[in-house]
Image: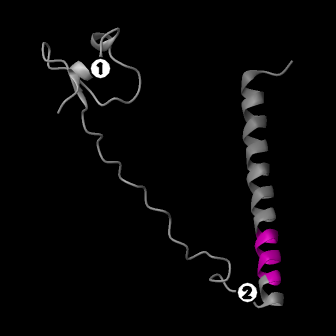
Amino acid sequence: MSTYAELKAQIAELENKAKAARSAELAAAKAQIADIMKNYGLTLNDLGSNAKPKSEKVRQPVPVKYRNAATGETWTGRGRAPLWLTGKNKDEYLIK
């Protein structure tokens, strides 16, 4: 049975081997990609690397449609109805 220290040493050794293998595979992949690009006359622009990321749309706040006059609570009409509106006519609380 291995000790904790021996297992830690094995882990470190395997991590080093994995890093080396990854570096070798990356170098081979880069060479293969460069060769394909050269054979077909492709540039980075052809691959679309200059594409700009989509900008997020800024959401505008939804206007309030209902107000509880007693407490001042409001509701936009979206999502689950608040408890103060349950079982009551919504038109009574509609903001005009």
Tell me what residue is drawn at x 79 percent, y 36 percent: 10
- The verdict on residue 6 being magenta is no
Q: Which mark is residue 42?
A: 2
Q: Is residue 70 above or below residue 39?
A: above
Q: Which mark is residue 22?
A: none
Residue 24 located left or right of residue 96: right
Q: Residue furthest right?
A: 1
Tell me what residue is drawn at x 68 percent, y 86 percent: 43
Q: Is residue 6 above or below residue 36?
A: above
Tell me what residue is drawn at x 31 percent, y 47 percent: 60
Amino acid at the residue labelled 2: Leu
Q: Which quadrant of the structure image shows residue 15?
A: top right
Which quadrant is home to the N terminus?
top right
**Which residue lies under the disc numbered 1?**
90
Which residues make up the magenta segment?
A: 27-36
Q: Residue furthest top?
A: 87
- Residue 49 place in picture, x, y as percent: 60, 75
Q: Nearer the viewer, residue 86 or 48?
A: 86
Which quadrant is home to the C terminus?
top left
Does dot 1 land on a helix, a strand or a loop? helix
- Residue 76 place in picture, x, y as percent: 30, 31
Amino acid at the residue labelled 1: Lys
- Residue 80 place in picture, x, y as percent: 41, 21
